[in-house]
Image (cartoon, grey):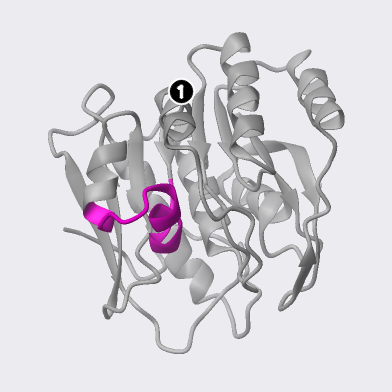
Amino acid sequence: MKIVLTIAGFDPSGCAGLLADTKTFEAHGVYGMAVCTANTVQNVAEFFEPGWKGEDELFFQLSCLQRETDFNFVKIGLIRDFDLLNRLIDKLTERNKAVKIIWDPVCMATASYSFHTRTDPKLLLEICRKIYLITPNLNEIAILVPDTEADEAGRYLSQFCNVLIKGGHSADQFSTDTLYQSGEIRDTSAEVIGFRAEKLPSVSKRGTGCVLSAAILSNLALCNGLTESCRKAKDYIGQYLLSGPGLIGNHDYKPGHSLKPNTV
């Protein structure tokens, strides 16, 4: 069985963070291990505080896992600050230079609690140079690259890593996730690829950003290329959204049974 790692917060409601990631991994047939960055205080609808874990404990958790496993695929989600993120990435790449890291830059909780409102541009680029893929939504890309249109920001960051901008927050009738492929690690001849699915009226689920990036990581671990991994993850999210009423989703995945995304 393929082993993957998530470094993220523990959402006790199970909708996002470590629990959502490991459910997604299991649904794809990969084995998930985890390092906890925060014990968030929240329920399905409300967020109260992040409950950050201490740095020493966080690095100790990671070191213990690395004694037995060289991780080839890692997802990083909720993190206290970007300096800590940078040092975590260094620890991962020191152990395994070939590791593929996906960073899902969680800047705000669904309940409108802000974790990050700005970033150091130089530090951001240093981080991007070391990772495989970054997966911001439209709100997050505006924080990472302020005063810049999303398309321009995606093309800019793709000079340093692959970029998938999630389009679920758009005003359009379609949710289009746009992949900007880095020239050095592109897996198709196309520089920009869109994955489009029609929005589902009155359908919403918590943790879709976490689930999408975890699904991409799972597919990469299963030897799919980046483009195919993003397409399959979009399909997974479609099924997750259709899995039942309310904000809680079901991870009983049946490939090809959701609304298949169109590649544009």
Residue 225 lies, with reference to residue 147, above or below; the image says: above
User: What element does badge 1 sit on?
Assistant: helix
Task: Inspect the magenta stretch and tell me whether residue 148 lies in it.
Answer: yes
Q: Position of residue 238 (x, y in %)?
A: 43, 68
Residue 14 lies, with reference to residue 230, above or below; the image says: below
Q: Position of residue 105 (x, y in %)?
A: 53, 48
Residue 183 lies, with reference to residue 112, above or below; the image says: above
Task: Inspect the magenta stretch and tell me whether residue 144 lies in it.
Answer: yes
Query: Which quadrant does the C terminus fall into?
Result: bottom left
- Residue 42 relative to residue 174: left or right: right
- Residue 152 relative to residue 115: left or right: left
Q: Residue at x 13, y 33 (%)?
A: 189
Q: Position of residue 139 (x, y in %)?
A: 43, 63
Query: How many numbered discs sit on the rendered protein?
Result: 1
- Residue most extreme to the left: 189
* Residue range corresponding to the magenta coloring: 135-151
Residue density around tag 1, few if under 14, some if 14–19, many if 20 or more, within 10 Å:
some
- Residue 92 relative to residue 33: left or right: left
Three-letter amino acid code at disc 1? Answer: Lys
- Residue 26 relative to residue 196: left or right: right
Pick the residue in front: 263 or 95: 95
Pick the residue in front: 210 or 110: 110
The reply to whether residue 181 is visible in this rendering is yes
Pick the residue in front: 174 or 4: 174
**What residue would you read off at disc 1?**
130
Q: Position of residue 69 (x, y in %)?
A: 70, 17
